[in-house]
Image: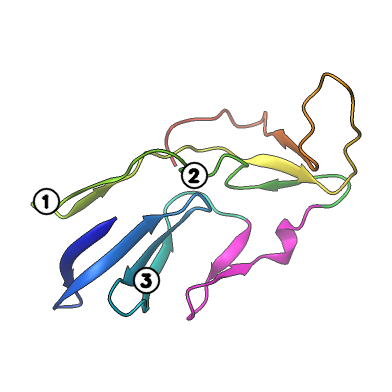
Amino acid sequence: MLIDADWEGLPRKLLVQANRNGFLYVLDRTSGKFLFAKAFGRVTWAKGIGRDGRPEVDPAAKPDAKGVLVCPGAGGVTNWYSPAYNPETKLLYVATIKECDVFSSAPQHYEPGHDFRGSVYMPNTDEPRSNRA
């Protein structure tokens, strides 16, 4: 979203993106400068955001043969849903999904008539999917 708003007391032209990876990013759209990022849902694949604006991957989230629970799941915290910003209230609205999946490094074998994604992930059945991140 392109938002004209005050940022740290100064008027700025912002680019705001709620990413499916679980982080909300704010950039200055005139310079491309990274301003801010923060998780807006459950994120277990990254430890946080570095000073350069890039996620810091958590090695504990790397899939193994047994499978590792990773949040957000394959569908993301948000995906195709359109966000909205109200300049009067200064509130940002983002539709979210709370879902984690189990990812595995075990090879997936092709079976005719079944989905083949090239990797293995299974929905987490311990926590039901919900529309709240």
Q: Is residue 82 above or below residue 56?
A: above
**Which is more toward the observer, 76 or 28?**
28
Q: Residue furthest top?
A: 113
In this figure, which residue is indicated by the disc labeled 2? Answer: 77
Q: Position of residue 70 (x, y in %)?
A: 66, 48
Q: Start and end of the magenta stretch?
A: 45-63
Ranked by sequence position, the earlier of labels 1 and 3 is: 3
Q: Quadrant of residue 61?
A: bottom right
Q: Quadrant of residue 30?
A: bottom left
User: How busy is the neighbourhood of tag 1: few (under 14 within 10 Å), some, or many (20 plus)?
Assistant: few
Residue appearing at x 17%, y 65% in the figure: 4
Q: Quadrant of residue 124?
A: top right
User: How busy is the neighbourhood of tag 2: few (under 14 within 10 Å), some, or many (20 plus)?
Assistant: many
Label 1: element kind? loop
In this figure, which residue is indicated by the disc labeled 3? Answer: 36
Q: Is residue 60 magenta?
A: yes
Q: Position of residue 29 (x, y in %)?
A: 30, 71
* Badge 3 amino acid: Phe
Residue appearing at x 36%, y 79% in the figure: 33
Label 3: element kind? strand
**Which is more toward the observer, 109 or 39?**
109
Real-space Cα distance between discs 1 and 2? Answer: 24 Å
In this figure, which residue is indicated by the disc labeled 1? Answer: 89
